[in-house]
Amino acid sequence: MDEIIRKEIEALIVAADELVEKASVSDSGLGHEYIQGLASIAVRGSQLIDRLYGSESQYAKMLQSVLNTKDFTQMHSNHYAHVAQLAGIFKAVKHDIESGTLIDFRRLVQAELFSDFLEMAEYLANEGYKDASAMILGAVLEDALRKLADSRGIGTLSAHGKPLAMDAMNVQLSKSGAYNALVKKQVTSWSNLRNDAAHGRYDGYDAEQVKQMILFVQKFCADFAS
C-alpha cells in the first residue's frame, strides 16, 4: 500500500509540473486535454490527501483553497499560480512520505495495538508525535466531559441541536458542582492546547506540556469518568 501511495503522489507531481510548464509559456488558455488533466489531478489529489490526513487537515484546507481559485480551469502564462500551488502541495506530501513524518494513526487504531486512546496518546507522545497525541487527548477529555454531563443530567447539545464545545460543558459542569474551580481552570488550559493542535498552531505548546496533559486526562478520567 505504501508503494501504491508513493507512485500515485509521484504521478501527480509529474502531471502538475507538466501543466505548470505548458501554462507558463502559453499566450492563450490551454485546451480541453489539459483541462481534463487538471481536473484529474485535482480529484485524485483530494482523495489521497483526505485518506492520508483527513478532510479537516491543513493539507485538505489548503488544497480546497486552491480549488476555489477563480477560473480554476483556465491556464495560461498570466494565470497558472494555482497549478503551481497544486504541485507544491503534492511535493509536500511526498516529503512527508519520504521523511517518515507521515503516520496513519487510523491504521494504529484498526490494528488494535492499544487497549485505549490514552495508551495510544502516551505512545505517540513518547515517539515524538506530540501534535497527534494532543488531538487524541483532547478527544478523550471531551468525551469524558460529555459522559460526566450526561451522568449529572446536564444537556450536551446547543439550542440548535449541535454538540456543545468543551468550554461550554466545562462551565456547566463547574456550576453544577461536578468539580472545583481549579479543575475547571485546568480543563480550560488543556482545551486551549487541544485547539492549538487542531488548528495547526503547533508552536503554541511543546512535548513536555503534552506529557503533562496525559497525566491530567488520566487523572480526570479516573476521578470523574470511571
Image (cartoon, rainbow, N blue to C red):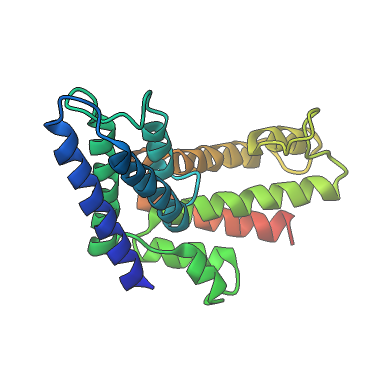
Residue 99 drawn above or below residue 1:
above
Q: Nearer the viewer, residue 120 or 152?
A: 120
Quarter that holds the N terminus: bottom left
Residue 134 drawn above or below residue 127:
above
- Hey, which residue is sitting farthest right in the picture? 153
Locate residue 88, reporting x and y percent. 24, 43
Quick check: 176 left or right of 217? right
Locate residue 106, reporting x and y percent. 51, 64
Residue 84 image-quadrant placement: top left
- Residue in the picture at 79% in, 45% down: 149
Does residue 30 show up? yes
Q: Nearer the viewer, residue 30 or 211?
A: 30
Locate residue 92, reporting x and y percent. 26, 49
Locate residue 143, reporting x and y percent. 68, 51
- Residue in the picture at 14% in, 32% down: 24
Quick check: 46 left or right of 152? left
Does residue 211 show up? no
Residue 98 drawn above or below residue 162:
below
Quick check: 214 left or right of 67? right
Quick check: 193 left or right of 37? right
Residue 87 image-quadrant placement: top left
Q: Nearer the viewer, residue 155 or 148?
A: 155
Quarter that holds the C terminus: bottom right
